[in-house]
Amino acid sequence: MDISNNLKNIRENISLACAKAHRDESEVTLIAVTKFVSVDRIAPVLELGVTNVGENRSQELVEKMDFFDEHKCTKHFIGQLQTNKVKYIIGKVELIQSVDRVALVAEVNRLAALRGIVQDILVQVNVGDEAQKGGVGARDLRTFLESMNAYENIHVKGLMCIPPALAPEQTRPYFIKMRELFESCKGLPNVEMQHLSMGMSSDYKEAVEEGATMVRVGSALFGNRM
């Protein structure tokens, strides 16, 4: 597996997608999804200039924390987060991307207050209205975001989604819907619509064309997990 060649292809695809959408490449951040990837395989990607990494599991993130810190990585938590796991990552990641319910917001806020910090988060949207997935429903999003003004130790920095598992072109309507939600929720108190995190290995090109500011790429970069 030639990871350097994979990264080159991903960067070229992002560049082409930006050109097609008349966007600047600087608007898009590539997040290397390092779930089940050893630090020995992650290191070459960091040496090639990738600085943002995303982990799905709190335990694995903790295990790699020293490595990420040594390499001055910007760390994102992108997986489903249980309230009893918040204590392991609060203040240690720049962005918790998968906040999707009031109980989780309250716990993040509580622990952030105890540490005297403000934790940046993204609100995960269940854009496909899928029962098996986490996320705030599109119809409930504005009300959910309006409630964020009650929490002094979190700051909403944008939205994240995982669309239905479809062919890449079929995910486009969901990305369009996310961009519309993103634009419509600007200006709310304690909400800064800065990041729109959408698109993974199979559909990051379509996501960039439709307005993603962050793409989360794992298997296209590192190959299939064990």
Image (tube, grey):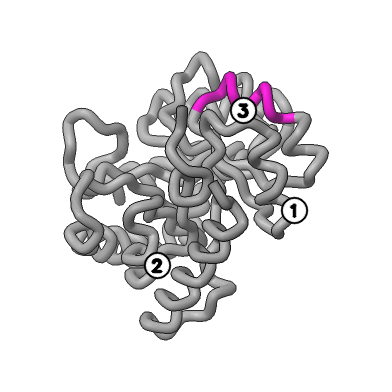
Q: Is residue 38 above or below residue 140?
A: above
Q: Earlier in the sequence, mark 3 or mark 2?
A: 3
Distance Cα–Cα, label 2 vs label 1: 24 Å
Residue lying furthest front: 1
Residue 71 location in percent, x, y? 79, 44
Q: Residue at x 35, y 63 (%)?
A: 207
> Which region of the structure is painted magenta?
57-65
Provide the secondary structure element on which disc 3 rests: helix
Query: Does residue 60 lie above or below 94 as drawn?
Result: above
Is 63 included in the stretch rendered in magenta? yes
Q: CA distance from mark 3 to mark 2?
A: 27 Å
> For this view, does 70 lie left or right of residue 189?
right
Q: Amino acid at mark 2?
A: Val
Give, as a three-letter code, the residue at label 1: Glu
Residue bearing mark 1: 47
Residue 117 point in image, percent of width and height: 70, 36
Residue marked by disc 2: 208
Q: Earlier in the sequence, mark 1 or mark 3?
A: 1
In the depicted view, which residue is nearer to us: 14 or 1? 1
**Real-space Cα distance between discs 1 and 3?**
20 Å
The answer to whether 153 is drawn above or below residue 175 in the figure is: above
- Is there a contact, CB below 8 Å, between mark 2 and mark 1? no
Circle 2 packing at 10 Å, graded few (<14), some (14-19), many (20+), is many
Query: Which comes sooner in the sequence, label 2 or label 1?
Result: 1
Is residue 55 found inside the magenta-colored segment of the image? no
Q: Is residue 67 left or right of residue 125?
A: right
Coordinates of residue 103 in the picture (x, y in percent): 41, 24
- Tell which tag, 2 or 1, sits nearer the viewer: 1
Q: Which residue is mark 3?
A: 61
Residue under the image location 71 percent in, 30 percent down: 65
Question: In this rendering, does residue 189 appear at all?
Answer: no
